[in-house]
Image (tube, grey):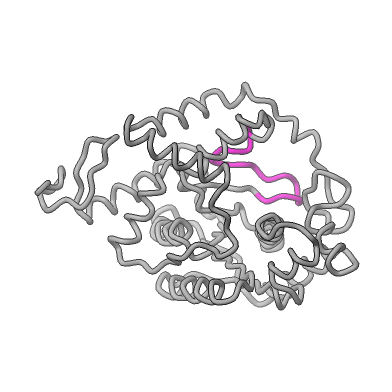
């Protein structure tokens, strides 16, 4: 039986690229230290910051919540949790309960936006009425609401649970499709743009997908195990991610090598998207045209763009909550 390289107790995992066997205690510390280093290396969070954590209830976002809750006491920043209830039947009910439980255990402020209450429709109903795929509509709605909440509460950044496998998959997909402009957005931090777009950070940028799963399992942290019933499996993203797993098994450390090389060369990629960014004429949030995707979507489903209505809804929701941070 393999023993922990640090303390000699029974090991629960071998870290191939680090050439270490680790017990549950030292594995937990190893993952948390990796996140701590990423925060320092990429300047993700400063003392006194207000950070909005986007938490769906899946393994990555629950790991994000747990780790940042711990690090907040050390770095002295204030985390807030945002959960968007998409109204996808039992799946959304389970997700919401898991997030509520995690927030209760970590004692963090929780903001829940229920799509049915906000727009009178679930994400599936929005998709059906708009004639767009449900995953596309889901992406538009979640990106808009995360940004809008962060802007309204004057958060210093929105933190998402994207892991290294996610980022590497996105980079390879954009490269294969020669969307080189899109690649430049796949960095650990995207800075704030005036009052139109909140800063975005990815604290799990150097954490493997397998590592977040192991982290929540060995620490007995509840998370949503089921896949979204609307998620498609036969996609380019999934195929690429499967091949990335195979590459790492055959060549341990190749993910790290790839992501570090990518960041060293990031300035060589064009940033044309910055020249196209505008403020939506309806809600004043970030847009690639005169009207943002959310306002165009709601105009199609409700007969009028609801960006400004949504911002007012969020303001009322936030009324009475303390956002002063440390």
Does the segment drawn in magenta span residue 196? Answer: yes
Q: Position of residue 216 (x, y in %)?
A: 35, 60
Q: Is residue 212 left or right of residue 129?
A: left
Question: Residue at coordinates 37% horizontally, 49% vertically from top-left?
Answer: 210
Q: Main secondary structure of the magenta part?
A: loop
Q: Is residue 259 left or right of residue 142?
A: left
Q: Position of residue 120 (x, y in %)?
A: 76, 77
Relative to 259, say whether 156 is above or below.
below
Q: State whether residue 43 appears in this view.
A: no
Taking depth in this image into account, of 240 and 123 the one nearest to the observer is 240
Q: State whether residue 283 appears in this view.
A: yes
- The quarter holding residue 213 reads bottom left
Question: Residue at coordinates 82% horizontally, 64% vertically from top-left?
Answer: 298
Taking depth in this image into account, of 234 and 31 the one nearest to the observer is 234
Which residues make up the magenta segment? 183-198
Q: Is residue 57 left or right of residue 302?
A: left
Relative to 68, say whether 111 is above or below.
below
């Amino acid at each position: 039986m393999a023993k922990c390289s640090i303390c000699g107790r029974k090991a629960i995992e071998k870290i191939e690229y680090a050439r270490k066997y680790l017990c549950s205690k030292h594995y937990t510390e190893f993952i948390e230290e990796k996140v701590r280093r990423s925060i320092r290396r990429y300047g993700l969070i400063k003392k006194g910051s207000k950070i909005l954590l986007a938490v769906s209830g899946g393994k990555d976002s629950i790991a994000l919540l747990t780790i940042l809750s711990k690090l907040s006491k050390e770095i002295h920043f204030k985390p807030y949790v945002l959960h968007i209830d998409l109204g996808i039947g039992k799946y959304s009910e389970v997700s919401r309960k898991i997030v509520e439980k995690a927030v209760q255990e970590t004692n963090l402020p929780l903001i829940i936006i229920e799509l049915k209450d906000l727009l009178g429709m679930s994400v599936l109903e929005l998709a059906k009425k708009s004639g767009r795929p449900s995953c596309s509509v889901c992406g538009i709605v979640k990106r808009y609401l995360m940004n809008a909440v962060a802007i309204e509460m004057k958060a210093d950044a929105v933190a998402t649970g994207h892991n290294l496998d996610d980022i590497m998959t996105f980079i390879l997909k954009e490269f294969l499709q020669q969307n080189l402009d899109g690649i430049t957005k796949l960095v650990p931090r995207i800075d704030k743009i005036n009052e139109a777009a909140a800063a975005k950070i990815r604290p799990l940028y150097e954490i493997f997908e397998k590592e977040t799963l192991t982290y929540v399992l060995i620490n007995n942290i509840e998370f949503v195990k089921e896949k979204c019933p609307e998620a498609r499996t036969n996609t380019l993203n999934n195929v690429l991610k499967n091949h990335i797993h195979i590459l790492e098994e055959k060549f341990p450390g190749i993910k790290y090598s790839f992501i570090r090389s990518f960041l060293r060369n990031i300035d060589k990629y064009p940033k044309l998207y910055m020249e196209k960014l505008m403020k939506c004429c309806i809600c004043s949030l970030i847009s690639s045209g005169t009207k943002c995707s959310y306002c165009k979507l709601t105009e199609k489903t409700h007969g009028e763009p609801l960006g400004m209505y949504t911002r007012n809804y969020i303001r009322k929701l936030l009324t009475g909550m303390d956002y002063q941070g440390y």
